Every structure is written in C-alpha cells, then in structure tokens.
Amino acid sequence: MSFLAKPVIFLLCLAPGAYLAYAVYLAFTGGENLLGPDPAQFLSLETGEWAIRLLILSLAITPLRYLFNWPVLFRFRRMIGLFAYFYVCLHLLVFLMFLLQWQWGDIGTEIAERPFITIGFAAFIILTPLAATSFNIAQRKLGRNWKRLHRLSYAASILGALHVIWIVRSSYFDAVLYGGLVALLLGYRLLRKYSKAVQQFSLLK
Ligand code: HEM
C-alpha cells in the first residue's frame, strides 16, 4: 500500500490548485461564481495560503521524522517543497494578472514601495534556485553545497511569515499561526544543533 502514498499526496497537493483553476474557468465562461465578490483577492489569498501551508509542511518533515522515528516521511519532502513553489508561482501570476493587470512598469514601484511585496518577492527569489536544484542530478553535481544552498529555505520561510504578518488587517489568526509555526520549526532545528554541539563539547572534555 505504501506505493500509493506518493500519488495520493501528489493529488492532495494539486487539489486546491485544480479547484481554483476550475473556479476561474467557470468565472470566464459565465458559470457559477465560486470566487466570491472580489475574485482577484480571493485567488491571491488562496494561492498565498497554500504556498505558506506547504512551505511549513516541508519544514515540518525533518522534526516529524525524528520525533516519531518515521524515515519514510523524507520521501515526500521534495514533492511538498516543489508544490509550495508551484503555489508561490500561481500567487505571483494572480498578482501580475489580476492585481497589476500586466502593467509591467508598476512591478518595480510595487516592489520598491510596498514592504510586504518586497519581502514576498525576496522569498520568491530565494525559492527559485531551490526549486531548480531540487532534482537528483543537481543534488549530485552540487555535492555538499546542495545542503548549504537548501538551508536558504529557512530564510524563505521567515520572509514568507513576515510577508503574512505585514499584511495583517482585522484578524491576527494567520499571522500568529504561520509566524508561530515557522518560529517553532526553526527553533527546533536550532535547539537540535545546539544540543549536538554541547554533547560534542562535553565528550571532548
Ligand atoms: C512573489 C512575490 C509575492 C507577491 C507579489 C505577493 C503578493 C501578495 C498580495 C498582494 C497579497 C494580498 C492579497 C490581498 O489582500 O488582496 C498577498 C497575500 C498573501 N501572500 Fe503573498 N506575495 C508574494 C509572495 C508570497 C510568498 C513567497 C508567500 C508564502 C510562501 C506568500 C503568502 C501569502 C499569504 C499567506 C497571503 C495571505 C495573507 C492573509 O491572510 O491576509 N506570498 N501576497
């Protein structure tokens, strides 16, 4: 049955995007409105939410694998990380298409003058080489540098969480949830690294 796990997770990750594509199709063909009164905002929020959820889930794989001694989880990390990037790209596409309406000249101004966009864009820039080098061949070619490069995902998650915190309007729920989870997952890594260093130091004495 374990051979089914990957395709099932693939379909689960794809489902929100497929639903949004269907909703956009209905909107363009005069069908039922599944996108609410402000379709551009709905699409922007949904794609952003899925991007950060999957980014956090990919960060959670390592702690979950160690806490529950579940090595099989590593098999899904790359796919979940790539889906996070996929939703970031959709999020950017929605921004360019529906919010900026392809006014290319405005992109620079938006990035320069709206700090939450600057931060979001920086996260996108960081995630791009990570997605491009997530395949086995790149992993082999980069050797030890691959791990170093992929540690940038921590910076991307911090920027992603800051981007959400910056947007806070009436509800703090998303900001607290995503900011808290990123802090928890990165805190766990720091603690593990620190306790390993302390252990090694005490063995040396
Ligand atoms: C590529 C650069 C990015 C741009 C231009 C961008 C733009 C935006 C905009 C304009 C909104 C507000 C939508 C609205 O309120 O109408 C938004 C919301 C959001 N973005 Fe981004 N974003 C970017 C990158 C990211 C990244 C990298 C993530 C996460 C990994 C992310 C996650 C979110 C989330 C979760 C929200 C919803 C926040 C809320 O609950 O109010 N964005 N983004």
Image (spheres, helix red, strand yellow):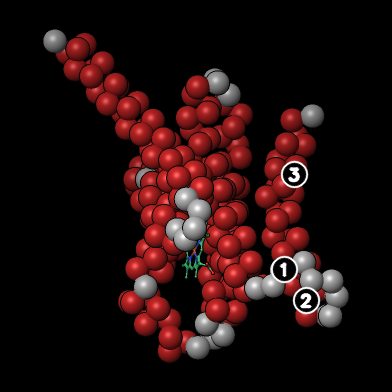
Q: Quadrant of the N terminus?
A: top right
Q: Which residue is mark 2?
A: 27
Tell me, for residue 35, which label it has, or none: 1
Q: Amino acid at mark 1?
A: Leu
Numbered mark located on residue 7 in the image: 3
Tell me the amino acid under the disc marked 3.
Answer: Pro
In the image, residue 94 lies at what x, y percent? Answer: 59, 73
Label 1: few (<14), some or many (≥20) within 10 Å?
some
Which quadrant is home to the C terminus?
A: top left
Q: Residue at x 43, y 36 (%)?
A: 185
Q: Amino acid at mark 2?
A: Ala
Could you say whether the residue bearing mark 2 is in a helix, strand or loop? helix
| Callout 1 touching callout 2 (CB < 8 Å) | yes
Is the distance from the Cβ of mark 2 to the nearest ligand 1 atom less than 8 Å?
A: no
C-alpha distance separating marks 3 and 2: 29 Å
Of all residues, the one furthest to the front in this rendering is 170
Give yes or no for contact between labels 3 and 2 (Cβ–Cβ under 8 Å).
Answer: no
Q: Is residue 146 at least partly visible in the picture?
A: no
**Against 126, is 150 above or below?**
above
- Give whichever of 116, 9 is nearer the camera: 116
Front residue of this view, candidates 52 and 204:
52
Q: Residue at x 67, y 50 (%)?
A: 13
Residue 143, image x and y in percent? Answer: 39, 45
